[in-house]
């Protein structure tokens, strides 16, 4: 079970944590940029305007900056919550983590299979156009997708055996009933 949890942590949780950190960093950067724009707007309000049209144009521009700041305040919340949940999963007991992993392995297996199916016509298209670099990249991606789908399938089966040790995928095995 420990190897299964470690594999889940390394192949699923840590990449998701890194992506969440990137999204959170980008959200905070956008918020700080919007806040500095809003502060610059407040400083400009103190200066006199030459015409009424200039003042109206500035007020419209300032209201857009204010709305942008309000929206930017909300953007870091979801990535922060996702990051906290993912980090909490790292410290959960192994049985709970394996239960979650079983469902995620199934989703990842399905995504790999669908991606492989989508890559087939792409490779065919690039082969017809004689764009060999993209064709070989598609073939390499298809190879990686097959390997990852096979890995996810076996990890799903291993997780199922940990969660339910008496359940079996073997059709030839006689029932205990």
Image (cartoon, rainbow, N blue to C red):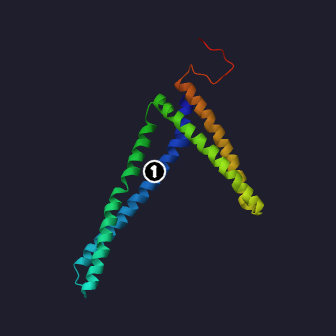
Residue 94 against residue 68 in the figure, above or below: above
Residue 161, horizontal then vertical, whole percent: 57, 25
Q: Residue at x 73, y 59 (%)?
A: 125
Q: Residue at x 68, y 43 (%)?
A: 146
Q: Residue at x 48, y 30 (%)?
A: 94
Q: Quadrant of the N terminus?
A: top right
Residue at the far bottom in the pictured view: 50
Which quadrant would residue 39 be assigned to in this image?
A: bottom left
Give the residue number, with chain letter if any, for mark 1. Answer: 20
Residue toward you, 20 or 69:
69
Residue 115, horizontal then vertical, whole percent: 63, 48
Q: Residue at x 25, y 73 (%)?
A: 42
Q: Quadrant of the C terminus?
A: top right
Residue 45, horizontal then vertical, whole percent: 24, 77
Residue 171, horizontal then vertical, whole percent: 67, 22
Number of dots carrying numbers? 1
Residue 85 against residue 33 in the figure, above or below: above
Q: Is residue 175 left or right of residue 25?
A: right
Q: Secondary structure at mark 1?
A: helix
């Amino acid at each position: 079970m420990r190897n299964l949890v470690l594999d889940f942590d390394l192949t699923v949780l840590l990449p998701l944590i890194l992506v969440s950190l990137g999204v959170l960093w980008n959200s905070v950067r956008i918020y700080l940029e919007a806040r500095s724009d809003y502060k610059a707007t407040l400083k400009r309000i103190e200066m006199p305007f030459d015409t009424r049209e200039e003042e109206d144009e500035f007020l419209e521009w300032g209201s857009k900056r204010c709305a942008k700041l309000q929206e930017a305040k909300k953007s870091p919340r979801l990535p922060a919550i996702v990051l906290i949940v993912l980090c909490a999963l790292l410290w959960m007991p192994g049985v709970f983590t394996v239960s979650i992993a079983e469902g995620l392995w199934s989703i990842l297996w399905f995504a790999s299979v669908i991606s492989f199916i989508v890559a087939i016509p792409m490779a065919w298209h690039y082969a017809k156009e004689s764009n060999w670099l993209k064709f070989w990249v598609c073939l390499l991606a298809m190879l990686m997708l097959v390997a990852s789908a096979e890995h996810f399938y076996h990890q799903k089966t291993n997780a199922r055996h940990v969660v339910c040790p008496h359940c079996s995928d073997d059709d030839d095995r006689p029932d205990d009933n």
